[in-house]
Image (cartoon, rainbow, N blue to C red):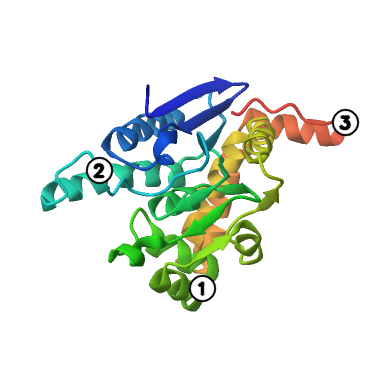
């Protein structure tokens, strides 16, 4: 059984974390499979959006504390293990395609941060989020110390990180950590619908907008305006902009091709 399953349908590339008996806990095999899937998502032009979810009863319970698949007493192996995780995180975050996470059950520890690396998060009523690291005497990894302060501010981030407290999907929504809450059992299907909608959008425009937004938090207004001008000058040359402009004039829905 593969630790990561993938399928491409109608431009949507689905990535399923597949260690259901362990709530999709991250080990070397799963991270390696995730890295390969993310590489494919970035490089394959037929892929126009990505949907990430977990099999079984949860999204991801974090690192597999019983067996990471490495010698955790060896600092070199620990660093290399995390660097593999970093490739997955930065790949999802920097990919110039929209990425949707569908969360049910636990998204805790590294699993929480894996969801935060995605652009949009749909969670059902069973979802639980936690930077649980403090409970085992560790610090957040896979981007937790980057994503959480940006999403909810330093003081609230400190509370969640220092205490390792768990929050449900409603609280996560109220704090701006996720985009939508759906009834139990509907997160994957709703995420699939959203990913399909995005796959039919102007992929290049979404990708450039995503890249500029990710830089905007540490740039001046003038810098962002310059990036917008550059990005728009590129987008105006795409077939999707030509189609969107023509569809607007003809008062019809555009049919974007992703280039």
Q: Name the residue under label 3.
A: 250
Residue pointed to by mark 2: 68
> In the figure, is residue 101 to the left or right of 75?
right
Query: Dot 1: what SS?
Result: loop
The crowding category of the residue bearing disc 1, from other C-alpha atoms within 10 Å (few below 14, some 14 to 19, many at least 20), is: few
Give me the C-alpha separation between circle 1 and circle 3. Answer: 45 Å
Identify whether 122 is placed above or below 157.
above
Q: Where is residue 248 in the image (x, y as percent from the top left)?
A: 83, 36
x then y, percent, for residue 126: 61, 50
Q: Position of residue 222 (x, y in %)?
A: 53, 66
Residue 107: image x %, image y %?
A: 48, 51
The numbered mark, 3 or 2, whose residue comes first in the sequence reads: 2
Q: How far apart are marks 3 and 2 (CA)?
A: 57 Å
Task: Give the residue at x 44% y 32%.
Answer: 42
Circle 3 Cα neighbour tier, 10 Å, few/some/many (<14 / 14–19 / ≥20): few
Looking at the image, residue 150 lies above or below residue 10? below
Mark 2 crowd level (few <14, some 14–19, many ≥20, 10 Å Cα): some
Quarter holding residue 171: bottom right
Disc marking residue 153: 1
Kindly identify the residue that appears in the image at 76 percent across and 35 percent down: 245
Q: Residue drawn 71% across and 31% down?
A: 242
Residue appearing at x 44%, y 42% in the figure: 92
Residue contact between numbered discs 3 and 2, judged by CB atoms under 8 Å? no
């Amino acid at each position: 059984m593969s630790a990561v399953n993938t399928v491409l349908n109608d431009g949507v590339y689905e990535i399923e974390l597949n260690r259901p008996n362990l709530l999709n806990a991250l080990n070397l095999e799963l991270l390696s499979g995730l890295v390969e899937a993310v590489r494919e998502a970035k490089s394959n032009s037929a892929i126009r959006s990505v949907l990430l979810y977990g099999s079984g009863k949860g999204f991801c319970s974090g690192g597999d504390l019983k067996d990471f698949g490495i010698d955790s007493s060896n600092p070199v192996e620990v660093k290399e293990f995390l660097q593999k995780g970093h490739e997955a995180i930065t790949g999802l975050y920097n990919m110039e395609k929209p990425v949707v996470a569908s969360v049910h059950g636990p998204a805790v520890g590294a699993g929480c941060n894996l969801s935060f690396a995605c652009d949009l998060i749909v969670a059902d009523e069973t979802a639980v989020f936690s930077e649980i690291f403090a409970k085992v005497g560790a610090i957040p990894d896979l981007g937790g110390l980057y994503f959480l302060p940006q999403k909810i501010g330093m003081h609230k981030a400190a509370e969640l990180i220092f205490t390792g407290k768990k929050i449900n999907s409603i609280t996560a929504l109220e704090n701006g950590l996720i985009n939508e809450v759906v009834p139990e059992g509907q997160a994957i299907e709703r995420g699939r619908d959203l990913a399909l909608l995005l796959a039919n959008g102007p992929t290049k425009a979404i990708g450039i907008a995503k890249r500029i937004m990710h830089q905007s938090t540490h740039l001046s207004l003038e810098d962002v305006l310059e990036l917008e001008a550059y990005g728009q000058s590129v987008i105006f040359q795409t077939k999707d902009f030509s189609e969107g402009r023509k569809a607007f004039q003809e008062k019809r829905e555009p049919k974007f091709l992703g280039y």
